[in-house]
Amino acid sequence: MRRLLEEHQVVASISGNDIRDGVPVTVDVQGDKSGGIIGYKARSHAGLIDIDKVRHYDVLDYWEPVHAPRRGGLVLDPADFYILASREAVNVPPTHAAEMLAFDTLMGDFRVHYAGFFDPGFGHRDAGGEGSRAVLEVRSFEVPFVIEHGQVVGRLVYELLMAPPARLYGSNANSSYQRQGIALSKHFKPLPAADVR
């Protein structure tokens, strides 16, 4: 892990001393890179989507934009589902894949991902990435939970592949999330600038 960090800067602004049971990933609740939007909260009872339809659905029919709190951290309401972003850019070299470690009770009573797999080339310059922020699917359980800017919310474990893939995750593979910031799935239309504020 330390060698990968030195050679590829797999998670920006992390030092080798931070690595324990994986490379730490922290959360952004300030929104400096996204005009103050730090995420989205799923609307209750919004209906189904057809996953074959790309850039089809209006964001505001399914999601509420979450703005950076004026002070302190973001309070996660129990049972609500949030999309947030990592503070750091993530980089997966072509020789590896990465997985975010399962929920750790030492981090609090919330879960930070429901997929957590990062393909070879995600955020890597060889695949046109130059670093991509990880999108985090977050849910609190039972009680409200305050999540602070820069709080560690997960750890990435990098696994060496038997051989590099024929195509990397990126623009040449028609990937949807290379160079992303805070982003929803490809099924939603981009949010108009007027609705961001």
Image (cartoon, helix red, strand yellow):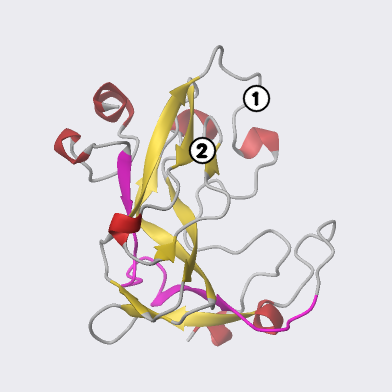
Q: Residue at x 51, y 54 (%)?
A: 180
Query: Disc 1 on helix, strand or loop?
Result: loop
Pointer 2 residue = 122
Q: Position of residue 19 (x, y in %)?
A: 23, 37
- Range shown magenta: 23-47
Q: Main secondary structure of the magenta part?
A: loop
| Distance from Cα at disc 1 to Cα at disc 2 | 11 Å
Crowd tier of the residue under label 1, counting other residues whose Cα lies within 10 Å: few below 14, some 14–19, many 20 or above: few
Pointer 1 residue = 167
Q: Position of residue 187 (x, y in %)?
A: 73, 63
Which image quadrant: the N terminus?
top left
Q: Position of residue 161 (x, y in %)?
A: 52, 18
Amino acid of disc 2 = Phe
In the image, 112 versus 68, the foreground residue is: 112
Residue 49 left/right relative to 26: right
User: Any magenta on residue 93?
Assistant: no
In which image quadrant can residue 174 be found?
Answer: top right
Q: Residue at x 37, y 65 (%)?
A: 33
